[in-house]
Every structure is written in C-alpha cells, then in structure tokens.
Amino acid sequence: MTGLDDLRLSWTALAAGPEPEGGEGHHMATLPLPERAGGSSILLGRDLDDRRHLLVPTADAEVTEDTSSDAVQILELELGTGPKRLRYADVVCRMPRLAEVFDDLILAILRTIGPDAAEAPEVCSRTLEDWRAMLRPPAREPLSVRQTAGLVAELHTAIELVRDDPERRIDVWTGPTGARHDFRRGDRALEVKASLSQGEATTEIHGIEQLAAPEGGTLHLVWMRLEQVPDGRVSVALLVERLRKLIGGSPALYLRLTEAGWRPEAAAEQLTFEIRERRVYRVEEPFPRLHPANLVAGAAPAGVRNVRYEIALDHASPLTGGAVGQLFAELAVEHTGG
C-alpha cells in the first residue's frame, strides 16, 4: 500500500524531467504505483509545468471532466500508442503550493479505488468533491495572531499525544468539534491555553464548565508561553506537517484542522513562534477556578451569560519531573470509554 514517504520518493524521481509520453504531444514523466485498476497500474505523473498528476486507468469508461476548481481538476487523458493506448482519469494539481494536500487526496483515492476500472472516474470525482467540501472555508475571519498561538499550542499537544498512541488516533483532539475540553480520552481531559504575554503567567477561562473535570474523571491544564519572532522554529505549517507524517494526512485530520480555523497557505499558517515555557497543572482543589460547586444551585444565576475570568497560575503548583510524560502517555493509549 502506497504511503506518504512513497509518494515523496516518487515525486523526487519524476523531477528529473519528463519524457514524451503518448502520441499527441503529451510530455509527462510517469511512474507506476503498486495499486492497479482493471489490471493496469495506476500512475503518478509530472509534466513540463511541474504539475502533479494521478492517472487512474478507466478501461475506456467515460470520464466526466471536472474543471470547476483552479486548484485540482479531473481530465480525460490517453497515453500510449496503438494497442497499448490507455484512457485515464487524470487528477491533476495545478497549484504547486498545494502539493502536500494533493498527496493526501491521492492516498484517499487509492484507499477507495476498487479493481473495476470502469468505476474509477466516479470514485475520483466523488473523493475530490468530498475533499473540496472538507477544505472549503466557512464564513469566518482569518485567525488573529492570538488565535494562531492557541492553534500552535493545541497542535503541539496533539503531536505529543498522537506520537504516544500506537493507533495514531486524532479523535483525542476534541476542541475543534465544539467539545467542552480541547483533548479527551475516556474520562481524562486536557484544556490547552496559550499566552503571548511575557509578564505574569495568567490565562482567561471561558465559562463555568471549562475547568470542570469529566464526570468521575480528571482534568489537566496545559499552559504555554509563546513569543512571536521572525524565523521562529514553530509555526502552524510546520506542526501540521508533523501531524501529517504521524497520521498520514487522513480526512479526520483535515476535518479537525478546518474546524479549528486552519487554511492551507493562509498568512496565519506562516507566523513563527518560539515556545518559551510550558506548564501542566492538575485541575483540582486548591487550583484557582470557578466551578459549579462554588455556586448556589451549581450554576450561574439566571440571566448571567458568557462568564469569563482570568486566573493567575503562580497561585498553583505545576506537575514536575516525569509526571507530565506519564500523563500524556496514559492519555494517548487509554481506550475510548475509559
């Protein structure tokens, strides 16, 4: 089964320069993949304009061309001569800056394609449309520097958890889905906060429930102090790439990213930071917080909404030594449901 590393090696090999392929002026270098359709190899191709192609044999089935996007299109292409001439559904990436995302689309198509080449055009079209819908930006403002710092902190935490999980599950990252806590596995939860302030260690809490542990479980707070600097070693783009290498660019990852406000090649993706400090706290008494148990009837008074407050973290004691590593390892490998 083809993986991300296999694709990267193939693109490097194809970069040597295309040789003429086909009888009608097509100039494209191609390499076969292990996957096949209708008894013929699925190909990777790279043309003279450095555009990347996935060529799926169709057994002469009609290809409905899709040029509704400037980024990725599906065209009909014939290669070879005489009896060796074959028709392909040509899935082509026309924007080199989207090459990494295109690799993940290729893997999604390869996972879906079946042995019947006649069904290949429909599989390519359906998969491409699913990805377009997944990556289509909702109506929202671009991420601010502060929001980008928050995403960096969450991605950094996600990498640690996924790396320790033999199953490489991204579902531990629950914050973008609207869940109460940023990370959750079974009855354990993490809330992640980032600060760009270089002064006192503080953070803003949103709502009475944000620092309430899951029923019968535990909650920890991860606080990171970031500094935005030119040529910093940490960015959203870098962390997304690390996650892709761990997970393989699954659709589930892109769903989380888009829900979190990520956009490929957006300005926020290129902002660079340095991580100056990280603290991890177990949120239990006497950690400073508002909690339903502190309130009459266990809830905010009627008519009180959008409760926000700031806590000073120097009034609490963070975990020390190997306790943080142990916490992350346990959260990563715990099976859903506790």
Image: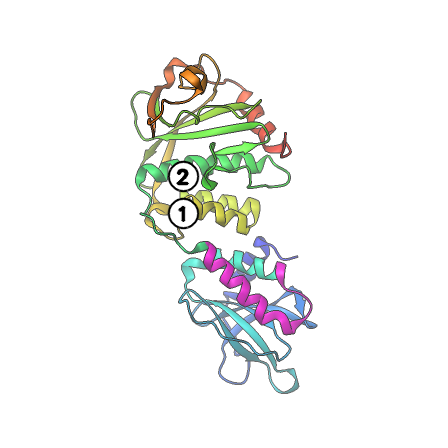
Question: Residue type at mark 1?
Answer: Trp
Q: Nearer the viewer, residue 284 or 55?
A: 284
Residue 96, picture quadrant: bottom left
Q: Which residues are magenta?
A: 111-134
Q: Nearer the viewer, residue 287 or 308?
A: 308
The answer to whether mark 2 and mark 1 are in CB contact below 8 A is yes
Q: Is residue 276 magenta?
A: no
Residue 317: x %, y % from top left:
44, 14
Q: Residue at x 45, y 46 (%)?
A: 257
Q: Residue at x 59, y 41 (%)?
A: 169
Q: Earlier in the sequence, mark 2 or mark 1?
A: 2
Q: Nearer the viewer, residue 129 or 296?
A: 296
- Residue linked to disc 2: 151
Q: Is residue 250 above or below residue 69?
A: above
Instruction: Classify residue 245 as left or right of residue 261.
Output: right
**Which mark, by number, is residue 262?**
1
The color scheme shown is: rainbow
Q: Residue at x 45, y 12 (%)?
A: 286
Q: Is residue 283 above or below residue 5?
A: above
Mark 1: few/some/many CA within 10 Å (<14, 14-19, 20+): many
Residue 136: x %, y % from top left:
42, 56
